[in-house]
Image: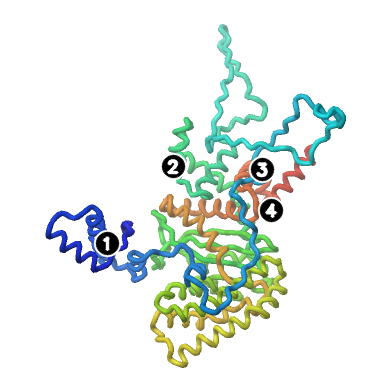
């Protein structure tokens, strides 16, 4: 990766003046900084050009500042002259940044009674009225720090007979098991590693600073054993994901240090594929790491699909490796990917790109309105056909005119961006023909950030078994997050009921495990 260079605004003429001044005497401090930055840039560029994998885009990113957003307003700079800006969907008013008591859903709640007064007492102020409780008590929030994994040492009294030598040891307190590692400790380690991207060695350093020795090898052993226990739940999630009416998939690069490829496998790449399935309004996320592409991993999931179900809608980008060859799907391609081709060349073709980006902004705006109004799939389809279809038809006519009237060179950046739109037009516009077809693949892109965070912090998996363990925990953690469920509580409860989830894993999904626990508590009472 190229080193980061200090960003300085220096023209070629100014550099030439600095070189001339350098021959006449010492340069001022600011001049030295600019000249050193120019020399550093030249060195980095030489190294990048020597690398066969360097692209023009990488060089452009080195020399020009990258955008922090691809929003149309930021890309274009301002609205088109004489054109009314697109109306914005209603947004929630921003607050002052503080979290109220209701935001602390995981906090322990302690009821504090008034020390001197109670309900129906006479008011000590006016001495006439009576006191009654408010509907909402006053709340005081108190935050404390603690170690991610805490340890308690129980010192059990041991008594020995001075005659026979028999030792009598005090029993542990009620509710304290004999196992060293509680299910909550294993759940926390797994959540930190595969949910937050904290490598084992960093957690070891943190815990050792707090007086809790926790070796990386021990952490790995705990999560590996837990993964074997949780395997039935992962398989049930995959089975339910296969029944979805809409599936998103994509992949990202990954690295496994020790990986033996099958005979005849000439591939050199390694990937983590993400699949997000929409099943009865619920979202199930699944991860797969290895040499298979996203389409092959999706095919493995769809093999669990009931034969009587109609083909699902599949959302992905236009790469052929994302399509499951052995299964029929209604293919839908990501509009955000198509749009990005125009964002990349907006500086070279500002007028043409403005038209395309403004048109697509209108389409995304109508989709946001449909989500805000919580329209059904059929109502959303009618809404898009009424509002977005004229925009897309106009864009299609404009794209064909650019080539027919020879306004654009086909091999230029703009020509390739237009050709991408035309080549994948049926898949990009499925949302105008099929209820429930999405516009973009953002839900899968966000899911893959779990794997990208792991790659960024831990750099690699050591073995394919380690990758499988990571896939399992990312599947459970992100599916819980998509359903608004506390992933730490979910993992902990699963690990506390190993025999029960092995018998009936369908009752231990993120959306019904709490109901299952409540039923067990009622029966026990």
Colour scheme of the picture: rainbow
Residue located beneath label 2 in the image: 202
Q: Quadrant of residue 492?
A: top right
Of residue 97 and residue 465, the one placed in the foreground of this image is 97
The alpha-carbon separation of the residues under discs 2 and 3 comes to 32 Å
- Label 2 to label 1: alpha-carbon separation: 34 Å
Res. 41 mark: 1
Nearest the eye: 36 or 326: 36
Pointers 2 and 1 in contact (CB under 8 A)?
Answer: no
Sequence-wise, the earlier of marks 4 and 3 is 3
Q: How far apart are the two marked residues, 1 and 3, measured between alpha carbons?
A: 51 Å
Contact (CB < 8 A) between labels 1 and 4? no
Question: Which numbered disc flags the more N-terminal residue, 2 or 1?
Answer: 1
**SS for callout 3:** helix
Residue, disc 4: 511
Cα distance in 3D space between marks 4 and 2: 32 Å
Label 4 SS: loop
Residue 114 percent coordinates (x, y): 75, 28
Q: Is residue 42 left or right of residue 193?
A: left
Q: Is residue 493 visible?
A: no
């Amino acid at each position: 990766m190229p080193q980061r260079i200090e960003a300085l605004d220096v023209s070629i003429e100014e550099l030439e003046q600095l070189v001339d001044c350098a021959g006449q005497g010492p340069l001022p401090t600011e001049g030295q900084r600019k000249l050193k930055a120019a020399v550093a840039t030249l060195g980095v560029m030489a190294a990048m050009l020597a690398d066969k994998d360097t692209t023009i885009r990488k060089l452009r990113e080195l020399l020009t500042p990258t955008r922090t957003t691809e929003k149309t307003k930021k890309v274009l700079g301002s609205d088109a002259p004489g054109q009314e800006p697109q109306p914005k969907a209603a947004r929630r008013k921003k607050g002052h940044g503080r979290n109220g008591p209701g935001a602390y859903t995981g906090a322990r709640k302690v009821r504090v009674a008034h020390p001197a007064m109670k309900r129906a007492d006479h008011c000590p102020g006016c001495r006439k009225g009576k006191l009654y409780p408010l509907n909402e008590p006053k709340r005081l929030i108190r935050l404390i720090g603690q170690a991610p994994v805490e340890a308690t040492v129980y010192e059990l009294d041991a008594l020995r007979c001075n005659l026979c030598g028999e030792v009598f040891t005090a029993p542990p307190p009620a509710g304290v098991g004999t196992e060293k590692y509680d299910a909550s400790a294993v759940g926390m380690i797994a959540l930190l590693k595969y949910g937050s991207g904290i490598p084992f060695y960093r957690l070891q350093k943190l815990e050792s600073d707090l007086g809790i020795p926790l070796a990386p090898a021990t952490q790995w052993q705990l999560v590996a054993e837990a993964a074997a226990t949780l395997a039935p739940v992962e398989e049930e999630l995959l089975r339910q994901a296969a029944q979805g009416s809409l599936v998103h998939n994509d992949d990202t690069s990954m690295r496994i240090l020790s990986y033996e490829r099958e005979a005849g496998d000439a591939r050199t790449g390694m990937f983590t594929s993400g699949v997000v399935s929409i099943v009865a309004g619920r979202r199930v996320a699944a991860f797969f790491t290895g040499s298979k592409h996203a389409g092959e991993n999706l095919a493995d999931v769809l093999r669990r699909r009931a034969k009587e179900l109609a083909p699902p809608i599949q959302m992905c980008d236009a790469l052929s490796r994302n399509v499951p060859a052995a299964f029929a799907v209604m293919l839908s391609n990501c509009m955000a990917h198509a749009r990005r081709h125009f964002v990349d060349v907006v500086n070279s073709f500002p007028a043409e790109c403005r038209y395309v980006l403004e048109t697509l902004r209108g389409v995304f705006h109508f989709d946001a309105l449909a989500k805000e109004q919580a329209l059904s799939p059929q109502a959303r389809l009618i809404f898009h056909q009424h509002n977005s279809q004229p925009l897309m038809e106009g864009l299609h006519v404009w794209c064909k005119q650019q080539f027919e009237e020879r306004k654009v060179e086909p091999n230029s950046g703009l020509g390739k961006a237009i050709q991408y739109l035309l080549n994948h037009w049926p898949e990009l516009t499925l949302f105008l023909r099929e209820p429930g077809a999405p516009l973009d693949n953002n839900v899968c892109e966000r899911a893959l950030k779990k794997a990208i965070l792991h790659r960024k912090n831990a750099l690699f998996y050591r073995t394919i078994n380690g990758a499988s363990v990571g896939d399992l925990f990312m599947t459970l953690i992100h599916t819980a997050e998509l359903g608004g469920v506390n992933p730490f509580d979910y993992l902990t409860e699963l690990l506390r009921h190993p025999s029960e989830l092995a018998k009936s894993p369908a009752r231990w999904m993120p959306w019904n495990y709490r109901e299952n626990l409540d039923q067990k508590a009622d029966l026990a009472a």
